[in-house]
Image (cartoon, rainbow, N blue to C red):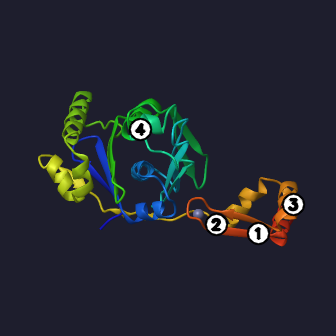
């Protein structure tokens, strides 16, 4: 079965792992657009990475992984929610063709936003330093969370897959020396993993191939799915920020206000009455 996110832990260590494979949700994400191949592949990596990172959410909300750059892809982002819904987009990247990550996202920033349904929004920003998304994420975690993290990502236009290993806060039963030894041992084994294996092997076989001498526990998988979070209400709320005057100006020109969701291409049309209601209700 595809489109899964699955957690695994190593007994008697402070290390946990997440592994994901996305097929239908990835296909649906790219089907709404006509991206160049290099963008399709990188978008797959962003989608897999956002999925892995969403497993660290401790509350209801959405995690957004975003890169802004002066390179061939000015903006690329993927969102994953705590209820396992995904969406992603690349903007103004129709001419992107480089196979070099540092060209695609030259002088870029990596931005991770966590938007809880209730509570305060958190945003972390680091310079994009690395030859691929995995390296940039590892640098991000080291700088902003001070958590040792390793990430493997692969995407081939059909599937997007990823695996993450992360150190948990130290437990009392394990000494600092043991902790370090475990981390080195577990990550060293993972370094033998090829992109081909990541793309082709079922999770249990993949983990067996890497860790048949360790005690690994694989948890029940979560099922991921493409689902855009746009709605009429959210679109109206976004329009409201433009102000009544600006909206009236557009209405005078075109008669309706037309909005196309850039993630899913859902079309929203609002007439004069709908816009008028929008501002009336805010007065109550
Ligand atoms: Zn949408």
Q: Distance of mark 4 from mark 3, alpha carbons? A: 44 Å
The answer to whether residue 225 is above or below residue 192 is below
How far is mark 2 from mark 3, CA to CA?
22 Å
| Image height of 69 relative to 261, above or below | above
Q: Nearer the viewer, residue 200 or 177?
A: 200
For label 2, being within 8 Å of ligand 1 is answered no
Question: Which quadrant of the render holds ligand 1?
Answer: bottom right
Q: Which residue is mark 2?
A: 231
Q: How dense is the environment of label 3, judged by Cα within 10 Å: few (below 14), some, or many (20 and up)?
A: some
In this rendering, would 225 be left or right of 256? left
Residue picked out by circle 3: 248
Disc on the earlier residue, 4 or 2:
4
Q: Which residue is mark 4?
A: 101
Rendered view: 82 above or below 13: below
Near mark 2 (Cα within 10 A), the count class, few <14, some 14-19 or many ≥20, is few
Residue under the point 84% across and 72% down: 273
Secondary structure found at label 3: helix
Please state the horizontal and vertical placement of residue 117, each as a whole percent of the image: 59, 56
Label 4 crowd bin: few (<14), some (14–19), many (20+), radius 10 Å: some
Whether the residues at callouts 3 and 1 have beta carbons within 8 Å, the answer is: no
| Nearest to N terminus: mark 3 or mark 1 | 3
Q: Which residue position holds label 1?
A: 270
Mark 1 vs 4: CB contact within 8 A: no
Q: CA distance from mark 2 to mark 1?
A: 13 Å
Q: For the point 50% across and 32% down, which residue is it? A: 126
Say if residue 103 shows up in the picture.
yes
């Amino acid at each position: 079965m595809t489109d899964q996110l699955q957690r695994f832990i190593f007994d008697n260590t402070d290390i946990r792992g997440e592994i994901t494979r996305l097929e239908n949700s990835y296909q649906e994400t790219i089907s709404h657009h006509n991206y160049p191949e290099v963008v399709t592949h990188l978008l797959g990596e962003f989608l897999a990475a956002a999925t892995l990172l969403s497993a660290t959410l401790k509350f209801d909300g959405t995690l957004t992984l975003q890169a802004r750059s002066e390179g061939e892809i000015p903006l690329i982002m993927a969102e994953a929610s705590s209820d396992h819904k995904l969406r992603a987009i690349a903007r103004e990247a129709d001419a992107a063709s480089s196979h070099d990550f540092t060209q695609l996202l030259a002088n870029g920033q990596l931005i991770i936003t966590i938007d809880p349904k209730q509570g305060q929004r958190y945003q972390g920003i680091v310079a994009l330093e690395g030859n691929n998304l995995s390296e940039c994420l590892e640098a991000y975690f080291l700088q902003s969370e001070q958590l040792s993290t390793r990430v493997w990502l692969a995407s081939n236009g059909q599937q997007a897959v990823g695996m993450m290993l992360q150190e948990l806060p130290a437990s009392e039963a394990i000494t600092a020396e043991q902790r370090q030894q475990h981390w080195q041992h577990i990550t060293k084994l993972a370094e033998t993993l090829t992109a081909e294996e990541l793309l082709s092997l079922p999770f249990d076989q993949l983990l067996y191939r890497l860790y048949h001498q360790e005690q690994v526990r694989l948890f029940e998988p979560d099922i991921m799915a493409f689902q855009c979070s746009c709605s009429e209400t959210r679109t109206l709320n976004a329009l409201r920020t433009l102000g009544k005057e600006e909206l009236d100006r557009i209405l005078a020109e075109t008669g309706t206000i037309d909005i196309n969701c850039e993630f899913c291409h859902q079309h929203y049309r609002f007439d004069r009455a709908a816009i008028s209601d929008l501002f009336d209700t805010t007065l109550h």
